[in-house]
Image (spheres, coloured by chain):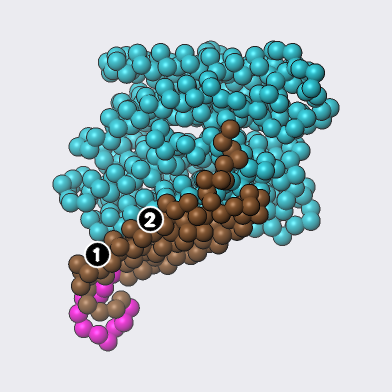
Chain colours: A cyan, B brown
Amino acid sequence: MTLSEIFWRNIVVLPILLPFSGALAGLLFSKHGRVRAAFALTAAAAALGCGLTLWGMILESGRPEVFQVGGWPAPFGITLVADPLSVLFTIMSQIVIVMGIVYAMGAKDSCVGYPPFYPLFLFLSAGLTGGFLAGDLFDLFVFVELLAISSTVLTAISDDRFGVEAAYKYYYMSQLAAAFLLLAVGTLYVAFGTLNLAHLADLIAREPARPLLPAALALLLAAFMVKSATFPFHFWQPDFHTAAPTPVSAMLSSIVVKLGIYGFIRMTTLLAPSGEFPINSVLIALGIAGIVFGGLSAVGTYNVKRMLAYSTLAQLGFILVGIGWGTVFSMTAAIVFAFSHSLIKSAMLMLAGYVASRASVKSAAFEVVGGVGKSLPMSGVLFFIGGLGLVGVPPTSGFVGKLLLFRSGVQSEHIITLMMITAASIITLIYTTRAFQKIWWQDRSESISVKPYGDRLIAPAVLIGLVLLLGMHAEPLVRAALETSRWLMSPTAYIQAVLGG
Amino acid sequence: MEILTAFAIGLTFAAGLYLMLRRNVIRSAMGLMILANALNLFLLSSGAYIGERAAYVTHLAGRYSDALPQALILTAIVISLGGAAFVLAMLYIIAERYETGDSDQVDGLKH
């Protein structure tokens, strides 16, 4: 077998395998920081390339790539499924991860220099893409655990002296989420005797009245709610995202929470698409609560990073509402919104960290960074564009997402929900302008000094550039999301592709 | 036997959750470990009453038992072991930094 044959046969595994091997190779070079970073960047970029190649493959063939690990046919073996949703989310997370590594390479934090930093970063990437590509629930659990442990360690080694406390709190929450997920796994196994997602979906569609199924779905919903930090389970998130080192918190608040969103989409479109269980209305209610509560909390915070973490709660609310409406267009809107939120939020967190790295004390609290931005106009411009993206003003990709969401709401006549989220989205404008005004507009007081050096600005600049590009030339992203949501609306195609026949 | 197993697993769950909610950080770490064991027992019970003979043993008569839950538990045990070691390491640093074992006093992030 030639090398290219091996490559094409195993391409579905590569987005998981490449970060893994990059991490292991990086661990060998414990004395050379540059080499580790180069390994990490190469592995992440290669994984992004594989994601894009996979997207081209499934677009051409019109059906997902299915990989049976070890050659055991589904539903008996371990299955990896690269369907449009998985691949789109993989591409999204790999773009942000590559930029996160670029930011870490130019960051002044001392934790970036620790030997395990880049390997852990790559383990985070592997856990995330593994979660997106996993074709059965137990694999999902394993990858979620990998993700939870690597992100906890990355926060625990933060320069912030409260890093360990935040990591400790988060770890308890994620263990609770893992417990919910394992309970759901056990319950579904008792009820249906399988854990393969496609097989489960098939069996659930045939026999939705099986006992234990509502309990299993509720447990699964709870697990994803903790993972995505939606409304009642969000309380760990601001602490955790504030204390993490900047490159890591940019990952946590943008793509790591999207694993829960991915889970919600899979639940509503594959596992229980029939509407017999009130999952969709639960998602809408949680989404609205998140938008209002997250927005109001973001207005009242004392720290930029914390503000952005609360804003994630609000922005994820819009995505949940889009998923909850459940039409092709609202799902398209949710996917576009998720994609652009990942880019915008990671860029804005990097900018907050950039300003904090210039402040005299390394902190993103308003009283420390207030006025620091006045001598850093470039970062101010980028933050302002990012803020416009969060609010949903053209020409940013945030505008495209919001426009699609509101149009789909008008089309499916959810007028009351629509009014509520429109009113609440004005809050976004308040907190982003407040942060901009406090950091880049007002004069700094005598006691605050600005360091002449700090983190590099290249990663957030590229991300904001992408946001503008996708805002002015939105067609590729919207078309990809539309393809994806059309695909999601026919779960039988997924089941057939995995199980065959 | 099934009723007894169910009650035993329920009791383990209750003990784990109760300990996990204690203010003492060591106790709550122990609660986490007990909870992980309760989950493993629950997974084990999902395959315990299917079949009469051990899987992969050929000279016995009767239906094969289901070996998959055991494979799942093996993975879950490894993960929870790593997690427990990690929690204890974090607690060591917390005890050193905050000089307390009371989780209510580990509140540096609360302003």
Q: From the viewer's perspective, is the residue at label 1 or at label 2 nearer? A: 2
Q: Is residue A163 left or right of residue A140?
A: right
Disc 1, SS: helix
Q: Is residue A347 left or right of residue A418?
A: right
> Between A116 and A420, which is closer to the camera in this rendering?
A420
Along the polypeptide, which appears first: circle 1 or circle 2?
A: 1
Give the x, y percent position of residue B48. 26, 70
Residue A448 vs A271, above or below: the answer is above
Q: Which residue is mark 2?
A: B18
| A261 magenta-colored | no
> What is the chain letter for disc 1?
B
Q: Which residue is mark 1?
A: B6
The amino acid sitting under disc 2 is: Tyr
Res. A469 visible in picture:
no
Residue shown at the point (28%, 45%) measured from the top left: A217
Give the x, y percent position of residue A67. 43, 53
Residue shown at the point (75%, 57%) measured from the top left: A30
The amino acid sitting under disc 1 is: Ala
Residue shown at the point (53%, 51%) measured from the top left: B102
Res. A388 visible in picture:
yes
Q: Is residue A122 left or right of residue A337?
A: right
Q: Which residues are magenta?
A: B56-66
